[in-house]
Image (cartoon, rainbow, N blue to C red):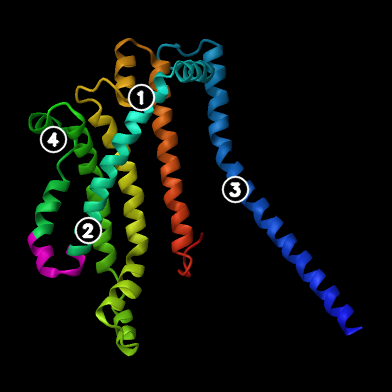
Amino acid sequence: MSNQSAISLDKVNSSKKRVLKSKRDLGKVTIMLKGFILPIVILVIWELTGAWGLISPTLLPRPSAILTTFIDLALTGNLIEHFKISLWRALGGFLIGGTLGLLVGVAVGFKKNIEQTVDPTIQMLRTVPTLAVIPLFILWFGFGEVSKILLIAKGAFFPLYVNTFLGIRSVDSKLFDVAKVLEFNRWQLITRLILPSALPNILLGLRLSIGVAWLALVAAELMGSSEGIGYLIMDARQFSQTSIVFVGIIIFAVFGKVSDSLVKVFEKRLLKWQDNFKG
């Protein structure tokens, strides 16, 4: 009799778990669908105003026309080739700039004398607009891939540097007292206390760095480029092909969001230990 009760209790618990899991999944789907409401409303109004002739197709083509242009460019292969080139430029620049930003941010965060020597110069360079240094990069590195990748690296460097530095310096001082009680050595202090505490800021810097890399990509592809999504947009602008301009803008928006979402996945996995993190 007791065995039957235990079996029935297990069945009840398992059914409760399935109900809770289905509710959580339904909640996630509902939240995701809510994010599509506003874009769908905008697209419907946009399409109707274009169909009724209220807006010039040269200034603002209909979503259906943009979709047709996207399909045509994809079928001819031009869009895919331009996108591959832009993706490699953005990825290369981000890896160089982001890695340097992380390493320098860690060094400046841990050492006061390095901060006093390096940080003032970096903060001064951070305020220089990316567009302002384009002529200088052309003079130094020419119109080739090196100048474009380094320009993207410049943009990706500063967000990760600043957030890594701030994350390390904002570690709660009370945690160091706990580390003394636990008799942490220097390596344990860095790997088990400082870096995990700075991780939220570092991941925020990573998200910002990826976004700036996509922004810098457009500026980089204005430097005498004959390939890439940025070049595709500028070339279409000269011939008033607004639908192609919108295709390029949408590609930047979509893949910028995709890259940001990938970092958010890492956030959910790496920041579960935080009580105030709502993942």
Q: Position of residue 238 (x, y in %)?
A: 29, 12
**Of marks 2 and 1, which one's residue comes earlier in the chain?**
1
Tag 2–tag 4 contact (CB < 8 Å): no
Q: Secondary structure at mark 3?
A: helix
- Pointer 4: residues within 10 angstroms few (<14), some, or many (20+)? few
Q: Amino acid at mark 3?
A: Ile
What residue type is disc 2 on?
Leu
The residue identified by callout 4 is 133
Of tags 4 and 3, the one toward the viewer is: 4
Which of the two discs, 3 and 2, labels the residue nearer the N terminus? 3
Task: Give the residues in magenta.
Answer: 108-117
What secondary structure is found at the residue carrying circle 4?
helix
Q: Are marks 1 and 3 in contact (CB under 8 Å)?
A: no
Who comes first in sequence, dot 2 or dot 4? 2
Residue of label 2: 103
Q: Position of residue 189 (x, y in %)?
A: 29, 77
- Magenta stretch: includes residue 113: yes
Residue 179 falls in image quadrant: bottom left
- The residue lying at 37 percent from left, 61 percent from top is 200
Query: Residue 15 — which label?
Result: none
Decide: few, some or many residues near mark 3? Use Cα within 10 Å; few <14, some 14-19, many ≥20: few
Distance (Cα) linking label 3 and label 2: 37 Å
The answer to which image quadrant residue 7 occupies is bottom right
Q: Which residue is mark 1?
A: 82
Q: Which sits earlier in the primary sequence, circle 1 or circle 4? A: 1
Q: Secondary structure at mark 1?
A: helix
Tell me the amino acid under the disc marked 1. Answer: His
